[in-house]
Amino acid sequence: MKITEVIPHVLIGKTAPYSTWASDFVDVRYSMVVEIRTDEGITGWGESVCHGRQPGGVSAAYINHTFKPLLTGKDPFDVEVLWENMFHTSRPFGGGGAVNAISGIDVALWDIIGKALKKPIHQLIGGAFRTKVIPYATSFYRVEGRSYPEAYIEEARELIADGFRAFKLKTGYGIRKDSEYIHAMREAIGPDMLLAADANCAYDAPLTRQLLLEVEDARLHFLEEPMKTDDLEGYKMLRNKTTTHLACGENLFTKYDFRRWIVEGAVDILQPDVCSAGGITECKKIAAMAQAYAARVIPHVWGTGIGLAAALQLIAALPSNQLSSFAEEPMLEFDRSAHPFRDAVIHDKITMEDGAVKVPVGPGIGVEINEDAVREFELRLTQ
Ligand code: MG
C-alpha cells in the first residue's frame, strides 16, 4: 500500500457563548484534521489539536511544506519509521509545533492500518484493558455577566443530571477566589463525586503551595497545570506537599519531554494529548515509560470527535498501575464546552451512557468521518 495524498483541513467555527479561563479566551474553535489517501482506496483521518486560539494553519503548513513530500509514496504500515523520519526532518524547528502536526498524521496512519486489517486501533496496540471509560466533564468556562461560584454550581447540577460523576473546574483566578470556588463546588456536589481543578499555568510555586494547602480538605482528585511546564523544579518541589495529586502534560511533546517529568517524579498524573504529544505511536511509548515509573496517565483531550475517538483507542490499551479490582482506572477528559463542529465531523456522535463512554470498535479510530461537515467548517488557505 502506498500513500498518494496528504490533505490538511483547517476547520474553524464560531463558539457561543464567548468563554474565558484564567489565561485566555475562545470565541472560535479551530482544528486541523488530516486526511491521508492511499492507492488501495483506504483513507485515514487524524487530528492535530488546537488549544485555545491557536490556528490550525500552523500544523497544516508543516504538513504541506515538510511532511507531505516525505510521506507520499510510502507504506502507511511503516508508521514508526515514518514518525522518526518526520521528527528528525522537523527537529530544527523545535518541539511542539511540528509534533502537533506529526500527531495528526500518526493517528491517520493508524486509522489506515486499522481499516486495512478491519480492526480498531486498540486491538493493534495490545488490546482492550477496558471497553468503556468513565469520563470527567471538562467545563466551567466563564461567561461574561454571570456570577461565580453560583454559575459553576448550576452547571454542575446540569452535568450531574446528564449522568456525570466527575468534573474539572477551571481555576487560576487568585488563591482566595479559587479556594472559594473549589470549596463551594465540593459542598454542592457532595463528598462522593470526583472533583479536579485546572489552573492553566496561572501561578508560580509559592502561590501553588498556598492553593494546595488551602483546598486540601476539598479532596481534589488532581490539580492540573498550576504552574507553567517550564518550571519542572517547581512541580517537583511541591509534589507530595499535600495529598492532592499534581498533573500536567498538554504542553509536553514526545517521549523526550515526558522522560524528564517521569524520571524526575515531578507529577503524579501525566496528560499527553494523542493529537499533540506525538500520536498513538508516541503516546504508547510515553505510557510505557510512565508505567515503569508507576506514574498514571489520563490523556488530555480537547479536540473534535476524531481526537476523542483516537484518545479512547489509546485509553482502552492503557494498563493499570494498581493490582486492585477497585483500581482507579484511566479516565476520559470529555470536553463539554461549546464547540461548533466537535460532533458534526463524525457520523456517530460519542456519548456517555450509564455514566461511561464506550470505546469505539469500528476499524481504525473506530468512527466514520462526515466529510460534508469537514467541508462545511473548512477554512480555505491560500497556501
Ligand atoms: Mg488543561
Image: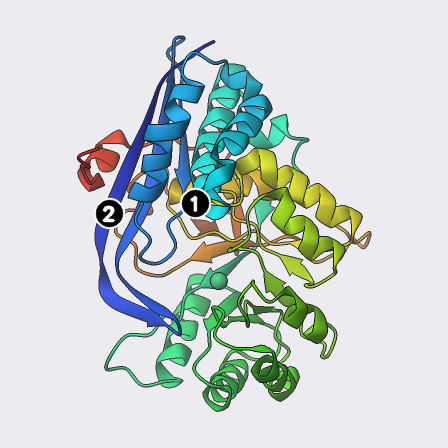
Q: Position of residue 233 (x, y in %)?
A: 67, 68
Residue sitting at x 60%, y 37%:
282
Q: Nearer the viewer, residue 344 or 197?
A: 197
Between 49 and 335, the one lying in front of the other is 49
Whether residue 50 is situated above or below residue 155 in the rendered picture: above
Q: Secondary structure at mark 2?
A: strand
Q: Secondary structure at mark 1?
A: helix
- Residue name at image x 32 percent, y 36 percent: 61
Amino acid tagged 1: Gly
Q: Which residue is mark 2?
A: 12
Which quadrant is home to the C terminus? top left
Give the mark, 2 or 1, whose residue is nearer the N terminus.
2
Structural crowding at the residue carrying mark 1, measured as other residues with C-alpha within 10 Å and reported as few (<14), some (14–19) or many (≥20): some
Residue 242, picture quadrant: bottom right
Q: Which numbered disc covers residue 97?
A: 1
Q: Residue at x 24, y 47 (%)?
A: 12
Name above or below for residue 214 compared with residue 93: below
Side (left or right) of 7 relative to 42: left
Residue 93 pos. (x, y %): 45, 41
